């Protein structure tokens, strides 16, 4: 009589690989950008996603911000961040203008209709040209440093915020926030040791004086056209200098100025027609 063979016994588990997996190491090309990965969060802290944006736009902007953070480990992520945030920009422009024209045309129309300034439109078009150059193989995916990427991505964040506009219920709150921040700023001391500091050609004292005059004027009688142009010049200077300030108090001091500059600029964007 043929007997049924016994069932096979349990197979032995594979031996554990006792080798510790490789941990990510900083990309040597990011040397000097930030002292460690934690500091990369400070670098992108000013990139605030509008809370009333669509999920698509929020996702694209948040991903771009995270790509800059992780460029600490992979340098090319900084350039990719700029190209990725253009998805959000193109989506918002198409909706605001009711057009599916190419991105370059949408940026030009937004400037013509006063939805963004000519200076901001030029920054946005620079991002577009970078993307197009990458697509043609004319630009390298390592074209930008993380600091350069922050400035370009910030331009897109600013444009998206301006194009979306604030939720109606938040307009008064925004004015109150600007006034509160200004009162707080007036009580703060200028950062010690930075009285004669110049960062990337930006004189911090002159920048502070110019912003103080603009904010006082905005809160008392409102800015006129010439001063609005000066405001955008100050925003460009802040975007250049703030990411490079490596002293915590000074960085926070000028980041607050940048926040107030953004709140002020948003008050002078024409409503959709």
Image (cartoon, grey):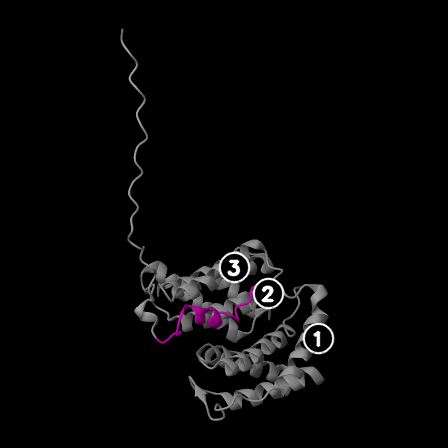
- The residue beneath circle 2 is 163
Q: Residue 220: which numbered mark, if any?
A: none
What is the quadrant of the N terminus in the image? top left
Q: Mark 3 — residue?
A: 88
The magenta stretch spans residue 37 = yes
Can you give x and y, in whole percent of width and height, for residue 222 in the image?
68, 82
Question: Mark 3 falls on what kind of element?
Answer: helix
**Residue 70 placement: quadrant:** bottom left
Element under label 2? helix
Mark 3–mark 2 distance (CA, rounded to whole Å)? 11 Å
Residue 140 place in picture, x, y as percent: 32, 64
Q: Residue at 38% across / 67% down in the picture?
A: 72
The residue pinned by badge 1 equals 176
Q: Where is residue 160 in the image (x, y as percent from the top left)?
A: 56, 65
Query: Which residues lie in the magenta part?
Result: 32-50
Task: Identify whether 51 is placed above or below 207.
Answer: above
Prevailing SS of the magenta stretch:
loop
Does the magenta run of residues contain 43? yes
- Quarter residue 82 falls in: bottom left
Residue 8 or 199: which is nearer the viewer?
Answer: 8
Q: Which of marks 3 and 1 is nearer the N terminus?
A: 3
Query: In the image, is 83 to the left or to the right of 113?
Result: left
């Amino acid at each position: 009589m043929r007997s049924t063979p016994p069932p096979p016994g349990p197979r032995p588990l594979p031996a554990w690989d006792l080798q510790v997996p490789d941990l990510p190491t900083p990309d040597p090309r990011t040397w000097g950008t930030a002292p460690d990965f934690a500091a990369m969060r400070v670098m992108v802290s000013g990139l605030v996603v509008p809370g009333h944006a669509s999920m698509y736009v929020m996702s694209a902007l948040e991903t771009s911000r995270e790509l800059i953070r992780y460029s600490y480990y992979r340098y090319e992520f900084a350039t990719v961040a700029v190209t990725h945030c253009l998805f959000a920009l193109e989506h918002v422009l198409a909706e605001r203008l009711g057009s599916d024209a190419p991105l370059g045309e949408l940026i030009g129309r937004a400037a013509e209709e006063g939805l963004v300034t000519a200076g901001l439109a030029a920054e946005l078009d620079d991002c577009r040209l970078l993307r197009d150059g990458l697509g043609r193989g004319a630009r390298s995916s390592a074209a930008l440093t993380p600091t350069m990427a922050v400035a370009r991505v910030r331009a897109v964040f600013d444009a998206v915020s301006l194009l979306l506009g604030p939720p109606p219920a938040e307009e008064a709150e925004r004015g109150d926030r600007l006034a509160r921040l200004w009162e707080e700023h007036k009580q703060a001391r200028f950062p010690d040791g930075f009285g004669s500091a110049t960062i990337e050609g930006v004189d911090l004292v002159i920048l502070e004086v110019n912003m103080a005059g603009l904010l006082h004027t905005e809160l008392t009688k409102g800015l006129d056209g010439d001063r609005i142009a000066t405001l955008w010049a100050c925003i460009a200077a802040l975007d250049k200098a703030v990411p490079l300030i490596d002293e915590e108090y000074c960085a926070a001091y000028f980041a607050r100025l940048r926040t107030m500059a953004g709140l002020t600029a948003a008050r002078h964007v024409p409503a959709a027609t």
